[in-house]
């Protein structure tokens, strides 16, 4: 080797090494863990089996975490041989990563039913059926829709622990001012009311809006609109998309496009949207009177009581398309599910804790009142101790409604909803104008994801 | 034991910690990532070999990756030069400051100390077209009239698909303090004799800047370019936080994947799409394919950049 070629070789090696070091971060990024003391009505939520420490991961933070801590304290008082070590602020992504890394978690609480398919089908969460059978738990004591989203294709690996219910909320003062006396029950009535309630500034821009038809505006989501047109994302087996074949979706899309036009067009609405107030603060548009109607969950009643106590508002079931008028009263339910992750070190004590959180009347009432979520254990839902006012009652009624819908869980998590949502964004802005082709395209994307996940 | 063997063992002894680090934190993850890229894997079940399905999807069926790639390239092409040119300008101004230079240095550097999440949230509020101070200024009568003549009529910034990426460029420009300090140090190190000699030779300010300043600070500019490209290829936090805040959904993290790229995927980056596939949709096999692709592209770009510019090679530089 000549000195010149030796230097050249060293330069090449140095450059390859430097390149490897510079890209090291990128690779890491890409590849980037017995006493029956409660009133349980067949739920079994008062039995204390096992002992020792239970490691409990949940997603709540701040004020809401305090409510969970209070429930834990009550459980520890009931079962003094078991202590619960809680870890808040852990979302589903973190829980899944922790389970895959073999981290010991005895009980995990997930915020959304759309992960149940992954939890149950992969064995990430223990099948609870043998424990339910051994304890003789009466599953009919759980709200039916909540019971359905907490299992996946016959495997019950979680129990529901409180649920969210959605409805139409409206500003009564703005209704009175606009002379609207009847709450909209159909999508057509909703659109008429939205137009009537909308006011404009001198320059033609929107001042107050009757209803924001864009999805991604707070809880005006594709899942809530799916209820209004009785549409599905996946087939019953969750193996293929039906977004392009369900007759409900075109009804929604055409209704939305028509309303956008009636309210002044996308540009005007988008300019109004740009000045949005934060959903979770007192700046919330509904609470400040920027918008007269919106879909939202039962928790909003607690936010209004806290942040806008003087507000004069009403709650009604989600409006339905005229084709589905007979379904009026149905809502959309999804909520927290609780289970035992694989590799749990103290599964028996964990099961006692789960039963308390999901199947104990007192615990469900305490958390329902504290979080203003809907209890999923029927005795708690019927308990006189549950603080129910006229607003909250609408959400409770939707929870009982047999036609209420829930999330369709699958092995690809929220991909179907998110992929449809992306198309809706392009549709409402006018970027995409071919509805049939667009829906076919969304279905193809969903099916591709299912295929990559080894489904179908 | 001979001296040569002892020396060799000593060398290996010194090298071992580094080699272990490279094997554990670089080679092993890289090999596993390449393996996962040929599997269907959700982290919770054992990976299943699926041949080239992920790669076929990457090159043929993924309808979002093109948009994410273009957005990422836009950020690389705009954010990196904007930050460097902005930092160079501010540094040059600071070298001219005769008074309160320290105060100005501190003022320009301060935004770089703010955590990215906080600075992004603050910036979204500042640019909020309804209540932000910038909107108030831009909406003031005469200014509004003038701006409307040039088509700059009350932009939605982070909430407008046409303005969301430029809004990120403004944010990047605001937090240029990290690059500014190294460029400033480099500018202060340029020998004054060279400027004097150039001036005697009749060179004006522009020529002095081009023929004296730039060659002297070139290694620093190259460093800023390379680290900037790497950082922007992984651009994730700022667009995620901006989308969540501007859409009114902060601070709740649930459904974060849905908000990524908002509005209309205008700020969806390659890194975000990778995260979405891997951790929201549980297709970690496909996410690994995307990671391998990113690794290859970034590796090739860095290889050619380092080959083209020899400033980091001690033998050539000397």
Image (cartoon, coloured by chain):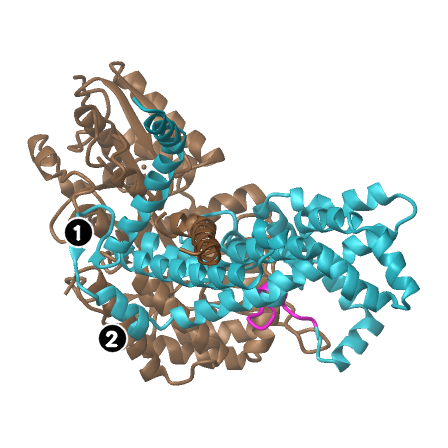
Chain colours: A brown, B cyan
Q: Is residue B194 visible?
A: yes
Placement of A446 over or under B243, stated as above or below: below
Q: Residue furthest bottom?
A: A434
Residue A53 drawn at (x, y percent): 27, 20
Quarter of the image where the C terminus of chain A is located: bottom left
Which segment did they paint magenta? Answer: B154-163
Which is nearer the N-term, disc 2 or disc 1? 1
Which of B88/A167 is in front? B88
Protein chain holding label 1: A
Q: Quadrant of residue A190?
A: bottom left
Q: Residues within 10 Å of mark 1 (few under 14, many from 20)?
A: many
Quick one: SS at disc 2?
loop
Protein chain holding label 2: A
Residue at point 69%, 54% (across, down)? B174
Residue B217 drawn at (x, y percent): 71, 55
Task: Give the number of the mark in front: 2 or 1.
Answer: 1
Residue A102 drawn at (x, y percent): 25, 35
Residue beneath label 2, please? A246
Residue at point 73%, 61% (across, down)? B214
Q: Is residue A220 visible?
A: no
Residue at point 63%, 72% (across, down)? A206
Residue beneath label 1, please? A152
Q: Quadrant of residue B16?
A: top left
Q: Residues within 10 Å of mark 2 (few under 14, many from 20)?
A: some
Q: Quadrant of residue A45?
A: top left
């Amino acid at each position: 080797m000549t000195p010149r070629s030796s230097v050249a070789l060293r330069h090449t090696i140095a450059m390859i090494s430097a390149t490897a070091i510079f890209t090291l971060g990128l690779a890491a990024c890409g590849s980037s863990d017995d006493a029956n003391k409660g009133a349980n009505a067949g739920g079994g939520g008062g039995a204390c089996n096992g002992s020792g420490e239970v490691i409990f991961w949940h997603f709540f933070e701040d004020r809401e975490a305090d409510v969970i801590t209070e429930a834990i304290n009550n459980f520890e008082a009931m079962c003094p041989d078991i202590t619960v070590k809680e870890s808040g602020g852990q979302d589903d992504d973190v829980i899944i990563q922790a389970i895959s890394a073999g981290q010991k978690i005895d009980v995990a609480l997930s915020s959304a039913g759309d992960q149940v398919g992954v939890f149950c089908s992969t064995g990430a969460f223990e099948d609870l059926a043998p424990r339910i059978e051994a304890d003789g738990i009466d599953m009919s004591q759980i709200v039916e829709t909540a019971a359905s989203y907490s299992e996946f294709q016959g495997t019950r690996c979680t129990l529901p622990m409180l649920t969210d219910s959605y409805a139409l909320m409206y500003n009564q003062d703005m209704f009175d001012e606009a002379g609207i006396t009847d709450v909209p029950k159909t999508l057509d009535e909703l659109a008429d009311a939205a137009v009537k309630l909308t006011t404009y500034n001198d320059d033609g821009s929107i001042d107050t809006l009757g209803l924001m038809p864009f999805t991604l505006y707070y809880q005006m989501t594709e899942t809530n609109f799916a209820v209004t047109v009785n549409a599905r994302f996946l087939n019953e087996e969750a193996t293929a998309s039906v977004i392009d074949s369900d007759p409900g979706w075109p009804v929604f899309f055409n209704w939305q496009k028509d309303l956008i036009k009636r309210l002044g067009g996308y540009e005007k609405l988008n300019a109004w949207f740009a000045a949005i107030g934060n959903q979770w603060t007192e700046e919330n548009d509904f609470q400040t009177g920027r918008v007269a109607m919106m879909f939202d969950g039962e928790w909003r009643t607690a936010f209004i009581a806290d942040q806008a106590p003087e507000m004069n508002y009403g709650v009604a079931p989600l409006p339905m398309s005229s084709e589905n008028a007979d379904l009026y009263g149905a809502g959309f339910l999804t909520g927290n599910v609780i289970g035992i992750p694989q590799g749990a070190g103290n599964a028996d004590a964990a099961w006692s804790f789960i039963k308390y959180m999901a199947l104990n009347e007192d615990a469900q009432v305490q958390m329902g009142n504290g979080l203003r979520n809907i209890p999923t254990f029927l005795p708690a839902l019927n308990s006189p101790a549950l603080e129910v006012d006229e607003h909250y009652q609408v959400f409770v009624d939707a929870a009982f409604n047999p036609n209420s819908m829930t999330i369709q869980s699958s092995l690809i998590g929220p991909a179907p909803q998110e992929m449809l949502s992306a198309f809706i964004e392009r549709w409402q802005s006018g970027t995409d104008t071919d509805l049939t082709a667009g829906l076919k395209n969304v279905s193809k994307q969903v099916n591709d994801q299912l295929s990559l996940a080894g489904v179908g | 034991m001979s001296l040569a063997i002892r020396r060799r063992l000593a060398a290996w002894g010194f090298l071992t910690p580094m080699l272990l680090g490279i094997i554990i934190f670089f080679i092993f993850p890289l090999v596993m990532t390449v393996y996962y890229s040929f599997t269907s894997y959700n982290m919770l079940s054992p990976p299943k070999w699926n041949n080239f399905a992920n790669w076929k999807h990457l090159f043929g069926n993924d309808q979002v990756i093109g948009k994410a790639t273009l957005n990422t390239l836009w950020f690389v092409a705009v954010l990196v030069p904007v930050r460097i040119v902005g930092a160079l300008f501010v540094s040059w101004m600071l070298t001219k400051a005769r008074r309160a230079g320290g105060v100005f240095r501190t003022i320009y550097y301060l935004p770089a100390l703010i955590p990215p999440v906080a600075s992004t949230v603050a910036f979204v509020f500042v640019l909020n077209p309804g209540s932000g101070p910038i909107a108030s200024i831009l909406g003031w009568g005469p200014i509004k009239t003038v701006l409307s003549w040039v088509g700059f009529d009350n932009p939605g910034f982070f909430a407008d698909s046409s303005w969301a990426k430029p809004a990120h460029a403004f944010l990047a420009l605001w937090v240029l303090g990290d690059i500014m300090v190294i460029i400033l140090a480099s500018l202060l190190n340029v020998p004054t004799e060279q400027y004097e000699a150039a001036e005697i030779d009749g060179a004006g300010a522009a020529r002095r800047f081009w023929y004296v300043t730039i060659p002297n600070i070139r290694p620093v500019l190259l460093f800023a370019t390379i680290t900037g490209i790497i950082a922007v290829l992984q651009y994730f936090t700022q667009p995620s936080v901006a989308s969540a805040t501007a859409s009114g959904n902060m601070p709740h993290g649930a459904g974060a994947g849905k908000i990524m790229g908002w509005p209309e995927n205008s700020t969806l980056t390659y890194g975000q799409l990778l995260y979405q596939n891997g951790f929201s949709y549980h297709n970690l096999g496909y996410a690994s394919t995307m990671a391998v692709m990113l690794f290859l592209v970034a590796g090739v770009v860095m290889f050619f950049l380092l080959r083209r510019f020899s400033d980091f090679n001690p033998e050539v530089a000397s």
